[in-house]
Each structure stands twice: as structure tokens, then as C-alpha cells.
Image (spheres, grey):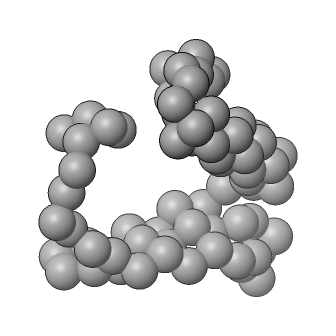
Amino acid sequence: MGIDSESDISANLQIGPTSLGMVRIYVEGTGIDLPMDFDPEEAEEIAEEIRAAAQQARVIAKGGSAKKGPKGR
């Protein structure tokens, strides 16, 4: 399954700081229990990639085309 493939899988997403100064992205769903911890700098990089993807999605939704972001995302 690729980034542009549709899926019927649903999951809950939680994001927040941990008591050890990390940023946790926690994904929970049927058969999924995935905590992912990132240092603050990595979390900021992920946030920038999400913002860039959102901007590209807006362009695509308006009928344009968008270039892939960093790391092919």
C-alpha cells in the first residue's frame, strides 16, 4: 500500500509530550498499538513535512499538480 492508496482501516491518532522530553505520536486501532517517540527537533521536521503536504494537497484539490516533498513524501 502506498501513500496515495485508499484504505478502509481506521485508527486514532494522539500527539503529545512524554515525561522524558520526547514527542510521542501514538496510533491505536484494530490490531494496532504503535507509540513512536521523537526528539523535539525530529518532531519539528515532521511538522514541517505535514505542513508542506497540506499545502500540496490544497494545490491538487484546486486542480493543479504538486511536487513530492522531502524523502519522496
Left or right position of 33 against 12 = left
Q: Residue at x 27, y 74 (%)?
A: 10
Relative image position of residue 52 (x, y in whole percent): 70, 37
> Does 51 appear above or below 16?
above
Does residue 68 lie above or below 9 as drawn?
A: above
Residue name at image x 58 percent, y 38 percent = 62
In depth, the one of 73 and 15 nearer the eye is: 73
Please state, as top left, top right, bottom left or bottom right, where the N terminus lies in the image: top left
Which quarter of the figure has residue 32? bottom left
As drawn, is 13 to the left or to the right of 22? left
Q: Quadrant of residue 68?
A: top right
Does residue 68 appear in this view? no
User: For the point 52% across and 62% down, which residue is it?
Assistant: 36
19 horizontally vs 59: left or right: right
Residue reaching furthest to the front: 63
Task: Note whether 31 is above or below 37 in the view shown.
Answer: below
Who is closer to the viewer here, 65 or 13? 65
Q: Residue at x 81, y 55 (%)?
A: 40
Is residue 15 toward the left or the right of residue 35 in the image?
Answer: right
Q: Position of residue 63 (x, y in %)?
A: 52, 31
Measured from the top left, where is residue 14 in percent x and y? 56, 79
Q: Is residue 22 visible?
A: yes
Total numbered labels placed on residues in the image: 0
- Reply above or below: 34 against 65: below
